[in-house]
Image (tube, rainbow, N blue to C red):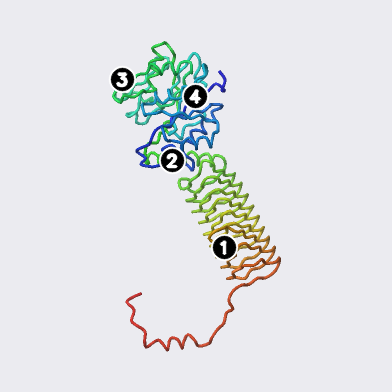
Amino acid sequence: MTRGSVSTIILAAGKGTRMKSRLPKVLHPIAGRPMLGHVLAAVERAGDARPVLVLAPAMEEVASYARSLLPGVSTVVQPSPRGTGDAVRAAEAAASDAEGVALVVFGDTPLVRSETLSGMIDACTTDTPVVVLGFEAGNPAPYGRLVLDAKGMLTRIVEAKDATPEEFAITLCNGGAMAVRREHLFRLLAKVTNDNASGEYYLPDVVGLARAEGLQCAVTRAAEEDLQGVNSRAELAIVEAALQRRLRKAAMDDGTTMLDPETVYLSFDTVLGRDVTVGQNVVFGPGVSVADGATIKAFSHIEGATIAEGAEIGPFARIRPGSEIGRKAKVGNFVETKKAKVEEGAKISHLSYIGDARVGAYANIGAGTITCNYDGYNKFFTDIGAGAFVGSNTALVAPVKIGDGAYLGSGSVITKDVTADALAVARGRQFEKGGWAAAFRAAHEGTKKISSGE
């Protein structure tokens, strides 16, 4: 068998009614990516496993998302919800090669690992044509039990309600996923009946039918946490927490310091370099890359941005999509950037908004500075040159260009380009009228009303 002869059937037809959502269940995000995306990524990493997605009617949104990740994915429709066995049968035409392996996985198990799927494929041989994924359950009560013979081969899957006392005591449980040689799978499925309380066709019945024909069935194991399914908002939160633990551990194993790991939230694609320090209550949205030696201080939120080596972010900074923070640059407390390139050594230390802009190398942006980039209809660009100094409480009305080394006086509203090394001041002239305040108070003192405490 070669890896090119693997088809992966992904069951994603569930409506997810317990989610109480208009969004299809498998599109609910985990760590910034729909749970189906996690499954598709694991399938792809497992190696040359041609995916076939089984959907219910009117799930084009799910199909479109799957195709955006894997253009080669096939989609088929299960006309009515008649069980997992019926769902796999719907994929027969799309996975009908005479030889090879059909791997069946579930679209609502986002924590499944690619190495687990790869191991199932490797274990599914001509001599052992059926492989079931199992796990040791902490609380096995609700799960189907995997009954093994003296040689450790699978003899049958018993539902909890049908188990004998001896079978009920088994802690090895059915994880759902299954790998079956294609020359057997659809033939065996054709024999599965719906003679049960639910009137559905169950995929696990394949095991009993295979054993009746003398075919060997094996079990591969995974951690219980890796096989958690999602059927409710509460389970969504449980899986999110599990994936966050996995992502944090991987980051720390690769050389990132987290001062309070449980308060840091990562996305599926967050890249953190070595000797990065991440403070408390930091959130990384999708599309963030942080280079070696950078510091992300507490309560910062970063999304769709690149942070260069040795840069310092926060605390309380918001770095929005399209931001590029340069080497040893500083974006401090209560600063927001959006689609902004902050070059090497530049400083935006506090209380500023820099959007649709470039801040040149070693420029200094004073507190309260804003780039006025939007006129209600269109966005415009602000270019701040290298070494420029922008005084506190300055408004830069785009489009505008500040030359290298220019100095902008505090409180200015800059509407025109400023040449290099020039001083620009644009504000009302201060004047003083001596004694005015005392005269004003005297004129009004007799008419002052007693306040009610305001």
Q: Amino acid at mark 1?
A: Cys
Label 1 belongs to which residue? 372
- For the residues labelled 2 and 3, the Cα–Cα distance comes to 34 Å
N-terminal of the pair, mark 2 or mark 3, is: 2
Q: Amino acid at mark 2?
A: His
* Marking on residue 94: 4
Label 3 belongs to which residue? 195
Note whether 256 is above or below 395 in the view shown: above
Q: Nearer the viewer, mark 2 or mark 3?
A: 3
Q: Nearer the viewer, mark 4 or mark 1?
A: 4
Q: Amino acid at mark 4?
A: Ala
Secondary structure type for disc 2: loop
N-terminal of the pair, mark 4 or mark 1, is: 4
- Quadrant of the image occupied by residue 365: bottom right
Q: Is residue 145 left or right of residue 47?
A: left
- Quadrant of the image occupied by residue 163: top left
Q: Position of residue 80 (x, y in %)?
A: 37, 29
Q: Amino acid at mark 3?
A: Asp
Q: Is residue 416 left or right of residue 436?
A: right
Label 2 belongs to which residue? 28
- For the residues labelled 1 and 2, the Cα–Cα distance comes to 36 Å
* Marking on residue 148: none
Note whether 289 is above or below 165 in the view shown: below
